[in-house]
Every structure is written in structure tokens, then in C-alpha cells.
Image (spheres, grey):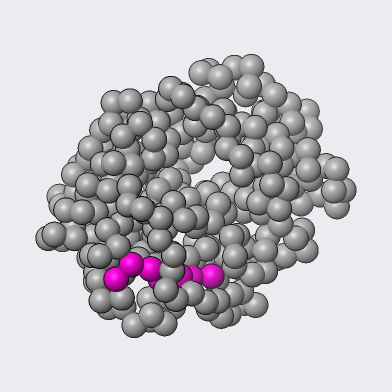
Amino acid sequence: MYPPIEPYAHGLLDVGDGQRIYWETCGNPDGRPALAVHGGPGSGATAFWRRLFDPAAYRIVLFDQRGCGRSTPHASDPAVDLSVNTTAHLLADMERLREHLGIGRWLLCGASWGSSLSLAYAQRHPDRVSALALFSVVANTRREIDWVTRDMGRIFPQEWARFRDGVPEADRDGDLPTAYARLVNDPDPAVRERAEIDWCDWEDVHVSLAGGFKPSPRYADPVFRAAFVRIVTHYWSNLGFMPDGQLLRDAGKLAGIPGVLVQGRLDVSGPPDIAWQLTRDWPDARLEIVESGGHGSGHGVGERVVAALDAFARG
């Protein structure tokens, strides 16, 4: 990864609905425009994203999606309305940001939920996307959400039982993201906090298959934790606000857009079959499997992403 850098410009963009999204640009102001699309939903864009790009070659744009990071209002406040936080809103925000920055076309680099959002944007606005570099690829299908919140209990049975038992008994055989969404919006702060902790404990477990895993310190922050769990359960209980399977069915709309998809073989949170399915109908995409990689940038995944971005910069 490239050395740490600081932004040369940043701001809050009013996107309507009382929402202002944080954005920043760094690297070369005259370089190839690229947008980093963070995961979660609701995790926010950290300085990590800046370091994937060659700062001499790229005009690097980061933004915090609605309700998280440095965007306002922050979803950690239980009074914040999430009805204006959907995939359609995020796609519109990305377009407003592109126009605000005077960018014609940009490369999108996304991970996990950010890969889904990048795919949705590219399928809606293919003429605005110069390339896609995605890792820990997911498509936000019902099958994937059920896999992460229920079926993965076959791999982590004790941990999943604790996760399941965090919701009322009547909800344990149903839709767990929806049950957790109710809990993290409960009027009782103690109920909300307990549900947030239980959800984040499970998040740490299901990304832990690759060796050397350490729990994420960000979940210790009650403000981050509250916003993250409210947003992710809001999206997962609504299938990401997209028709089930849409991103896979519409992969053919990406024809003409070069793409590199980097996937860890040990990524049980986002199994490699999703990325493989995408490349079957997307003729300009290449799938790279990292045998020791899990969910995220570790164990060689990040290095492959950097290499892909370097190659796009040269091309």
C-alpha cells in the first residue's frame, strides 16, 4: 500500500432530505478520477482507502455514505430518520458528488457492501464509470444475507447461537436482521446497546476464518457501533433496497467497463461464487482468487487491489 496522505480538499455536500455527506479529495488534482466506496453499510471511509491508490496517478475521492462517518445527521442518534437512507438515495448522492467535483467519468473501487453499491452505480450509469476494482465482492441477495445471518452457524455454531439468542425467542426462527433492526431502534437505550454489541460480536466472528484475525477495535466505539448496526440492519432487512438478484441478473450491463474482482478463498462472509457469477456475464472483468485471503484486505488481497489500480493507472 502507498504511504499515508492527507486530503487537499474536503467538505460537506448538501444532498437534500436534510442530509450532508462528507467528501474529500487527495492525490493528484489532475490525475485519473477514482471514487472509494466503503462497506458496511455504515462503516464510513477511513484513511485506509487513500493508500490503495498511487497518489501521483489518481485524483482520489472518498465519501461517507448517509448517516455514518463524518456525514450528518449521524445515525447513532436514534431520532435520525433512516427512511431517506436507501440505495437509491446513495446512488443519487454519488452522482451529485461527481457533478459537484466536475468529474466526467471515474473509476470505482469498492469492498463488501461497497462492491454492491459500485455495481449498482455502474449498472445505472455505465457511461460514468471508467473501470471497477472490487474486492470482498457481494451482491446483497437474500441467499447471501441468510447465509451470513443463519447458515454460517454451521461453521461457527456456538457463536451463532449467541447471536440468534440475542433476539426475542419468538423471532429466532425468522428474519434475524429484521429482528435486530427492531431492537436497535427500541426506545430503551439498554436494549439498543445490548443488540448493537451482540450484532458486532457476530460481525467479528464471521470475518475471522483467515489466519491471524484480530477483533475490530472500531466496535468498541459506542457512536460508531450504534450508527453501523442501525444502518446495516436497515439495509439487510430490506435486501439492500434492490430487487433480489438484480446485480447478478444485470451484470451484462457492465459490458465495456474493465473490471478486476479480488476475492479471498477463505472469505466465508462473501463466498467467491458471487464474484465468479458476475464475471460469467461481464466479459471485461477478471476474477483473481487469493488462496489465503479472507473478508477484507488482508493476506494478499490488498496487494492485488493495489496492483489492479496501478495497472488501470498505466492503461
Out of 171 and 27, give the one closest to the viewer.
27
Q: Quadrant of the C terminus?
A: bottom left
Above/below status of 62 relative to 101 = above
At 46% from the left and 37% from the top, the residue drawn is 144
The answer to whether residue 192 is visible is yes
At 22% from the left and 49% from the top, the residue drawn is 308
Q: Describe residue 302's horizontal placement relative to residue 232 as left or right.
A: left
Above/below status of 262 relative to 290 = below
Out of 181 and 263, give the one closest to the viewer.
263
| Coordinates of residue 111 in the picture (x, y in percent) | 40, 48
Q: Which segment did they paint magenta?
A: 22-28
At 32% from the left and 60% from the top, the residue drawn is 108
Q: Main secondary structure of the magenta part?
A: strand
At 43% from the left and 69% from the top, the residue drawn is 7
Which residue, as the protein is rendered here, is positioned at the far left?
315
| Coordinates of residue 139 in the picture (x, y in percent) | 40, 46
Quarter of the image holding residue 265? top left
| Coordinates of residue 262 in the picture (x, y in percent) | 29, 41
Q: Describe residue 270's horizontal placement relative to residue 158 as left or right.
A: left
The answer to whether residue 92 is visible is no
| Coordinates of residue 204 in the picture (x, y in percent) | 57, 32
Above/below status of 279 relative to 77 = above
In the rendered image, residue 26 lying in the magenta stretch gets the answer: yes
